Image (tube, helix red, strand yellow):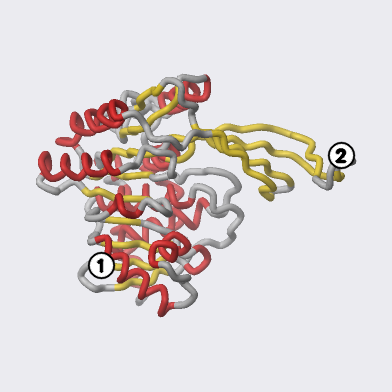
Amino acid sequence: MPLSGQIHKGKILKEHIDRFPRARVLVVGDIIMDEYVWGDVSRISPEAPVPVMDVRRETKMLGGAANVIRNIASLGGRAAGDASGFDSGWPLLCGVIGEDSTGQEITSKIKDIGLTSEGIIIERDRPTSIKTRVVAHGQQIVRIDRESRTDFRPETIQKLLGFVEKNIPKLDAIVVSDYGKGVISTPLMNGLKELVQSASSGSVIIAVDPKTGNFEHYRGVDVITPNHHEAGAFCRFEIEDEQTLIRAGKQMLNELNCGSVLITRGKDGMTLFESSGETTHIRTVAKKVFDVTGAGDTVIGTFSLGLASGLDLKSAAVLSNFAAGIVVGEIGTSSVSADDLKTAIED
């Protein structure tokens, strides 16, 4: 594209970023606490052939669907004391936590960024999901998961759908963040699709960040954003080159009957497949890749905000590519601000 065209395109993208605070987005999915233990390794244990780490610090951050909402809030300029002039409380988070201290901490963090916790349901006798990552010298050496993957109670799913139903007349998009912890199920997805059709005549966008093994839940959605490993697992072959990539994208469009598929490909960028038959390759803009943790959350959040603010599929995908290029340059779960995104476009 000529330089003048790039400048014009960049101006349009930045104009839509300014519209993000007007977008009404609800995120439903698996809420997780991301915990990090940071330290240094200088010796091997005499008890077993494993490294001994001296812990320097520990941090806790919102993860899963809660990290998606954190990204959307950051991009939309939402924060405690927001003076943008728009309704407070948006975007909305809908998910489940346990009746424990971790669940309370997640609720507190949600409120700290100026968002409501009304859509967070507490299910007793179920732990809040925690992912603990041990990082030494900037490299993750082990991850510890504490969670339950059993089905949620039917009444819990109904409470989630009730929260969506109450808010759907005001929504532009619903983001489904599936981490395979049990929230995203056939009853929930069928309920979401029925609500969108009955309450909005299909005008509300449903965008899904998928989980391998759960693809049967996503049939008929507007947008799905698998990485190349997830896409290959669904298609039952490995994506090795452009030929297998295109074959996979088209197969997903046909078998899932969805509006578009955005396959993220790490250092190779991402590729957008549209139901119209168009295929668009988008090169990565990441200068360095330190950690891909949470990159999928950033992609689905930015892509959905772009669509909710009026961007076409290609432009929204380009915008999400810029956002992903920022977060993979950081270690640990991170989010992107509107100003960061504008700077990346200018650069």
Tell me if 36 is positioned left or right of 220 in this view.
Answer: right
Seen from the viewer's position, the closer of residues 64 and 213 is: 213
Q: Residues within 10 Å of mark 2 (few under 14, many from 20)?
A: few
Residue 193, image x, y percentages = 20, 45
Which residue is rendered at x = 56% and y = 62% of the image?
287
Seen from the viewer's position, the closer of residues 117 and 251 is: 251
Residue 114, image x, y percentages = 38, 27
Q: Amino acid at mark 1?
A: Asn
Q: CA distance from mark 2 to mark 1?
A: 54 Å
Which residue is rendered at x = 34% and y = 42% of the image?
184
Q: Pointer 2: what residue? A: 47
Which residue is rendered at x = 57% and y = 38% of the image?
145
Seen from the viewer's position, the closer of residues 152 and 167 is: 152
Q: Which mark is residue 254?
A: 1
Q: Which quadrant would residue 72 be assigned to in this image?
A: top left
Q: Is residue 346 visible?
A: no
Tell me if 251 is positioned left or right of 245 in this view.
Answer: left
- Do the residues bearing badges 2 and 1 touch, measured as CB atoms within 8 Å? no
Q: Is residue 29 above or below residue 87?
A: below
